[in-house]
Amino acid sequence: MAYVFRRPAKDGKIRFTAMYKAENGQYRSAGTYDDEDRAQQVADESERHAHLRLAETSPAEKATITVKGFVPKFLREHAIEPNSRQRYAEVLRSHAIPYIGHRRVAEISRETFHRLLTVVLKDEGVGQPSILYARTALSAMMQMAWDHGYREDNPLRGIRLKGVPGKPIVVATSTQFQRVYDALPHQPAKVFARLGVASGVRLCELISFTPEDFNFDTGMLSVNKSTVEITAEFHPEGHRFLTRSYTKNGDHRRFKIDATHLECGSSRCPAALCLHSVSGPAYARFLAHRQGGGPGACAVQARSRGSHDYNALCEDLGRRGLHRRGCHRDHPWRRGLENRRRQCERP
């Protein structure tokens, strides 16, 4: 028979411990609660669960699990893309667990979440985009808790936060692109850049092209894959880059491109092979100037005759040049890309 007994706390407050009869006939605790009715409810549900020998999570565990303990279950079972799962994990570990990780999922209130998002994180200097993403991640987690019976509502539903105003998109002129194009180190890089501008595909699609995507007889290009960079923790096979067999929005496209984009400087080296040899997230970051240089830029720095011109161009555009983030001559990014470039330019 499930029962509840009073337990005085150190601060003099009376709390209630729920007890239930387990399968072996011994009584076990189902947690301690502030409300006596809540404690009795959990005790009855735990005893019923033990009597029926259900395989699901016990009521006692559902009633006492904390936000920190629930996050691994959420990240493991929530149906999202690996890169989104990684982003959720980063946000929850940085902006949720340090503040509310000790609170129970079943008992944490809407007011606590509202104060976290509107007061605590702002006082800690967290930007509004990160706060909005934290609300998205927390809402998805609380929705799973509701669906799985850990609580009876989603406390974040309906919480409104101030949005982030959009920023204007600055498009490079033909003259600016020509200066970048002339500063690129070798022919595969130029083909890569021209194809990206001419096709208008996303960066995650551009770095996913393989020779099979090009039809050299008809001049058709198929866009049917996308690549993202994630950590080994969230990669299905423990790697760094994940190529998915679908595009970012799920739409496959096929269109005709100009014949000049299908040929490299050497007739023995088709553009697709050049793209396959240099296209990768690191080298794409180099071409897109996402961070003013980086591993991909370092990979072609030392032996690129156009690196000096590229540094001057980056300085003119207000970005950091290659020399400011140089790397060792034997950096693995550089070795890999240089070897592939030599294979592509081999007579």
Image (tube, rainbow, N blue to C red):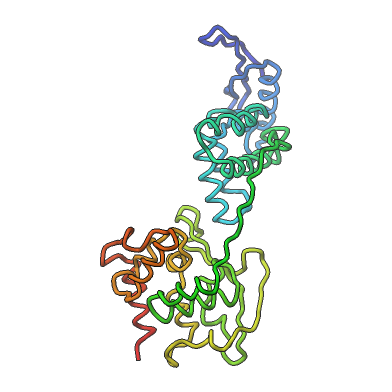
**Most foreground residue, 25 or 166:** 166
Residue 197: % across, % down = 56, 74
Residue 321: % across, % down = 37, 62
Q: Is residue 247 above or below residue 53?
A: below
**Most foreground residue, 90 or 162:** 162
Residue 150: % across, % down = 66, 34
Q: Is residue 146 above or below residue 318?
A: above
Image position of 18 (left or right of 304): right
Q: Is residue 98 above or below residue 333?
A: above
Image position of 131 (left or right of 251): left
**Most foreground residue, 270 or 148:** 270
The residue at the point 41 percent across, 75 percent down is 184
The residue at the point 62 percent across, 24 percent down is 21
Image position of 148 (left or right of 345): right
The residue at the point 36 percent across, 83 percent down is 343
Quadrant where the image shows the C terminus: bottom left
**Most foreground residue, 99 or 103:** 99
The residue at the point 62 percent across, 67 percent down is 247
Image position of 76 (left or right of 54): left
Residue 303: % across, % down = 29, 74
